[in-house]
Amino acid sequence: MIGAADLAAIREAHPRVFRRSTAERRRLALIWTVFLAVLALGLWRVLPGWDVFVAGLGKLGFLVRFMIPPAHGGHLDQMLHGLAETLAMAFMGTLLAAFAALPLGFLGARNVLPVRLFHFGLRRLFDGLRGIDSLIWAIVFVAAVGMGPFAGILALAVPDTGTLAKLFAEAIENVEKRQVEGIEAAGANGVERARFGILPQVLPVMLSHVLYFFESNTRSATILGVVGAGGIGLQLAERIRLDDWQEVAFIILLILVAVAVIDWISGRLRRRIIAA
Amino acid sequence: MAIAVAGGGDAVALFETRHRDLRRRKALTTGLGALLFALAFGASAIVGEVDPGRFAAGVPNILDYVHRTLPEISARQPLTDIGEWYWAIDIWLLLMLDTVLMGFVGTLAGTAVALLFCFHAAANLAPTRWSFWLARRGFEFARTVPELVFALIFVFAFGPGPFAGVLAIAIHSAGALGKLFAEVNENADPRPIDALAAAGAGWTETMRFAVLPQVLPNFLSYGLLRFEINVRAASVLGIVGAGGIGEELYLVVRRFLYSDISAIVLLILITVSLIDMGCERLRHGLIEAGPARATR
Amino acid sequence: MLEITGLTRRFGSVTAVDDVTLAVPNGQMVGIIGRSGAGKSTLLRLINRLIDPSAGRLVFEGRDVGALTGRALRDWRTDCAMIFQQFNLVQRLDVLTNVLVGRLNHRSTLSSLFKLFSAEERALAIRTLDRFDLAEAALQRADTLSGGQQQRVAIARALMQEPRIILADEPIASLDPRNGKVVMDALRRINREDGLTVLCNLHTLDTARQYCDRIVGMRAGRVVFDGVPAQLTAAMVRDIYGMSEEELDQAETVTSTAIEAAPSRMAA
């Protein structure tokens, strides 16, 4: 195919084709070393002993075998109630967050209140609220208002208020200026300006965000029960503690179906809102 | 139809009827929507045990709770006070590091699985119908079951510790990333794929040389985004015993060690923000420097 | 010798290639002409087996290649390299890797996955690129090259397959006349120097007349002309295209100005 002499000549003429430059090789070596070192550290910290791993796999195999066939074991009404609770939590939590985020979003928008320091502080507050997971909020609210779905609603609403307020503020900052000016020219005051100049433009965007959050909250709400904040998660955690794998599988299937249905409905609604 | 022969007066009447029809239909939809909403609201309020009275009674509790968690930092000796607030900083930092590592290893494992099967899950690339179906359903299942549920099951099987958390994160990430990767694949330019098939390359090689170079920058960007999400997830998985800082957080909450709660929550917030910032810079670098570096 | 007998391909109720019979001796340069939609592209894709025939036989050197599958099919595809109108390079890979891609069927999957091409393969790629004055561009990304350069990279990729036949599907339709000439010259060179059979779909009659030993005219999926360029009379052209050569030229000018006027990234 190619003689040794030819090969040497071509190598001579195009050294980079056969070997990367020293600088590039060093850079690559550095990247790989750092990456592999972090990975090694990570594996060392998280991997269990070999026997634990093997025993766990065996247990997992049993578990899956015990899950089949999934069955509700006569507790269907209880489970459905848990599911209803989950959906109610997602619904009320999203609604609460949306209502709280509406004024906050207006206050946080640069074109509504051009006070830099206030704006900066409010944005950091939003970041703080959404930076803490709803599960942590759930722990706090269970301690404050007691166990049950009400704590879950609050736990969903608080971080979502932060995120929604941020999204709302961004939507408001992106409004068409001329329409707002038109309302101002007609002699509207601040609140009227927001109501008639800005709100009609941003409402579809906001609604679409809210629906999306309802979807995602349905997923989150399924697990809040683990810390006592209501919903189907409580029953799931209980069944796992009680070794009731058929019922565990049944509950997981219930969750899957519920999430799929909510996704479908909310997806259709969102498409309609955007189309309108 | 009457429109063709209708005179001026009829046209107005026709418009009026149509307009009225339209308005009636719109009013009906709105009314129906409002009714459904009211029903959902009512049902949710009852099922969700929403009780304004209880909430009102709870508000002072919440404020009191938050107030208690705030550390006492005096102006006279602030550093000493902060040192006291973070009295267990060595343990917490180690736990936080564990949490980040859980997120890292979990993201990596999830990305690997997603990478392996995302070509099967793309409608334009899947080699066989059944592998397409299997990959799609697999990813769907993995991302719909909440991480915490996987974590509960794995803690039961492997015992408490970070391994259960990593597994849970990995599976959930595989599902979420697999779907995103498959979508990216479906937008890949088909021309190089054609060329490689025509050159006698096998399916695997075609994916490697015609598709992967096109999609890799997007994959990396999604992977980094997922890492940010996973560090957050890892910080709460400890609540069910799956390792990391969450375990400590749940412990101090149940023992009412108020100032420790705020200390740990703040630590999580800072770490998560730092990682978000770092990843954002990396992602921007990825987009700006262009995929030239990423592919060679 | 490539023998095509009664080759037919139907898409639903449309017959794209209708009972085509051709015998192409080794080393011939064949131009296939006809209006767009006449079935030229489908014919080339049928030969490479990117599309499976509905009926008919495809025989190369006494070997039936119409019914191959798996490994044997890939080997056959390696034997008949394709060149595309849009070059079909992997834009984000460098020229060198794009050319080495032609070797994929000659090596093990595992070493390919990690891009472990041997020194010989790299040298061969450089030598092939050098034939088309592109060795210096080996480490550039494919999308930094002009259209004419990209098409020559594609030809280099095809040669790396060590093929017996080159199937070129409108190789110069996306190029300006100057680059078109460079690419056609390159195709003729590999036809003359390497003795490869070249089957080339062309939309301009001039090019076909100038470069090809033999011209095949297609209309509505059927072969309506098969002969040397000298035999292609005005009547035959009218029969193939449904219009005279002057009208054809005019239509051609219109389209090429349209192509030049459009902001084209190929023309960089």
Image: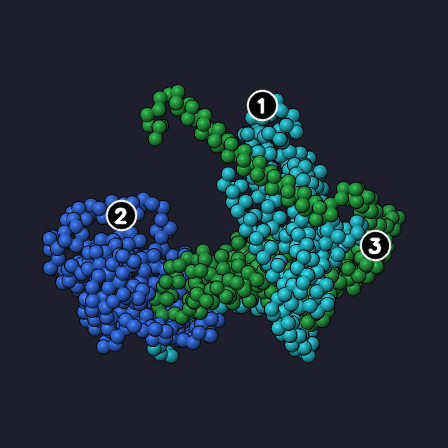
Residue at the image position 35 percent from the left and 28 percent from the top:
B2
Q: Mark 1 lies on which chain?
A: A
Q: Which amino acid does label 3 sit on?
A: Tyr
Quarter of image, res B88: bottom right
Q: Are callouts 2 and 3 both on one chain?
A: no
Q: Which of the two residues, C216 or C157, is positioned nearer the viewer here?
A: C216
Residue under label 2: C256
Mark 1 is on which residue type? Ala
Q: How many labels does the image show?
A: 3
Colour in which the image shows chain A: cyan
Q: What is the x, y in percent for residue B41?
A: 66, 43
Q: The green chain is which one?
A: B
Q: Confirm whether residue A260 shows in the render.
A: yes
Q: Are marks 2 and 3 in contact (CB under 8 Å)?
A: no
Image vertical order of residue C63 relative to residue C148, above or below: below
Q: Which residue lies under the disc numbered 3?
A: B258
Where is A26 relative to A169, above or below? below
